Image (cartoon, grey):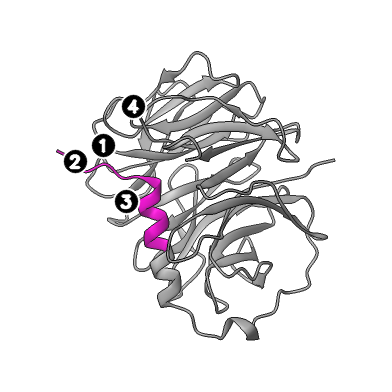
Amino acid sequence: MKTKVHYLSLILFLTLMSCSKNEKDENELNIDNISFEGKIAYESEVGGSGIPFFEILLIDENGKTRLTNNNFYDGMPVISPNGEKIVFGSTRDGNYEIYTMDINGNNIIRLTNNNAYDLGPVWSPDGSKILYSSDIDGINSIYIMDINGENKTRITDDTSNELFPEWSPDGSKIAFSSSRTGENEIYIMNSDGTNQKQITDGGGNNMQPSWSPDGLKIAFMSGYSNEDISIIDSSGSNLIKLITYFGNDAMPVWSPDGTKIVFSSSILGGNSNLIIMNSDGSDMSRITNSDGIDFPHDWKLIE
C-alpha cells in the first residue's frame, strides 16, 4: 500500500532543509529595496520550539499585512480573480480544512468539514469553482467544488498521491503532481480530469506546478538533483533548470506579467524566505526576512 503524503510532512521537510543551509547570521540580512506590482499572498512560520505554526500574510512594495493570528496552521492562500477573497487551508478546527475569507482577513467561512486532509485550494480563473486535493477516499486525489463548498467532485481516480493542482490561465487545463510512477512528476489534464499526460520524467521530486500567465510554461519545484526551481513548456518540452544551488528552493509563483517568479529559498542566506527573480533565473532579490520560513502561493494585481 502506498504511503499517504501530507502537506505537513512537506513543511517539516522544507523547514529542516532551510535550517540546515543557513549561511549568514540573520542579523546581517537586509531586505532588498525593490519595487514590484501587485500583492503576493504567502504563509509565514511564526511558531516556536520547532512547531510549524504558519500564518497568512500579504506583501506588496509598501510592506506586509498579517491576515490570520492563531496557534494553528493557516496557509496555502490564493486570491480570488476579482481580488475580493482568499481561499486557504487551516487546521484551526482540528485537521486540514478549506476556508475562504475577505481580502482583509474578515468573514472566514469553512467550506469542507470531514476527517480528511483537504489541501492546496485554488480558484478557477472565472472565480466560480475551487480546485483542491483531498484524501477523503483514502488517497490524495484532485477534487473540484463550488465556491460555497457544494458539489464536491473527484476528477482523478488513480491509486497514487496527487497534490498541488493548478488551473491554467484559460481554465481549460489543470497541472498537478502525482506519484503514480513511483516518483512525484508533473501532469496535465483537461479541467474535467480527462486526457491526463505526464510532462516531466526526472525520476525525482517534481512538484508544485505554477502556470505562466500566457499558459505556455510551467514553473515547478524540481528534484533532479537538489530541490530547485525549473520551468518547462506545457507541452513537456524545453526543460530549463533556473537555479543550481546546494540547498532547497520551493513554491514558485509567476508574477502577473510573467516576467518574474517569486519562490521560497535560503539561497541568499538565512532562512527560506521570499525571493523574487527574473523568469530566466537572473537578478535575485530577497523581499522578506522572517525568523521562520515563508512560502508564496499567489501573486495578483489588486485594484
SS type, badge 2: loop
How far is disc 4 from disc 2 in space, using C-alphas? 15 Å
Residue named by callout 3: 201
Residue named by callout 1: 160
User: Splitting the image into 4 quarters, where does residue 189 fall?
Assistant: top left
Residue beneath the point at 40% across and 25% down: 114
Q: Residues within 10 Å of mark 3 (few under 14, many from 20)?
A: some
Q: Residues within 10 Å of mark 1 (few under 14, many from 20)?
A: many
Q: Position of residue 277 (x, y in %)?
A: 64, 66
The disc, 2 or 3, on the residue closer to the chain's N-terminal end is 2
Establish if 203 lies above or below 50. Answer: above
Residue named by callout 2: 2
Q: Nearer the viewer, mark 1 or mark 2?
A: 2
The disc, 1 or 2, on the residue closer to the chain's N-terminal end is 2
In this rendering, does residue 166 appear at all? no
Q: Are marks 1 and 2 in contact (CB under 8 Å)?
A: yes
User: Splitting the image into 4 quarters, where does residue 110 fall?
Assistant: top right
Mark 3 residue type: Asp
Residue 9 falls inside the magenta stretch: yes
The disc, 4 or 2, on the residue closer to the chain's N-terminal end is 2
The foreground one among 141 and 15 is 15
Q: Nearer the viewer, mark 2 or mark 3?
A: 2
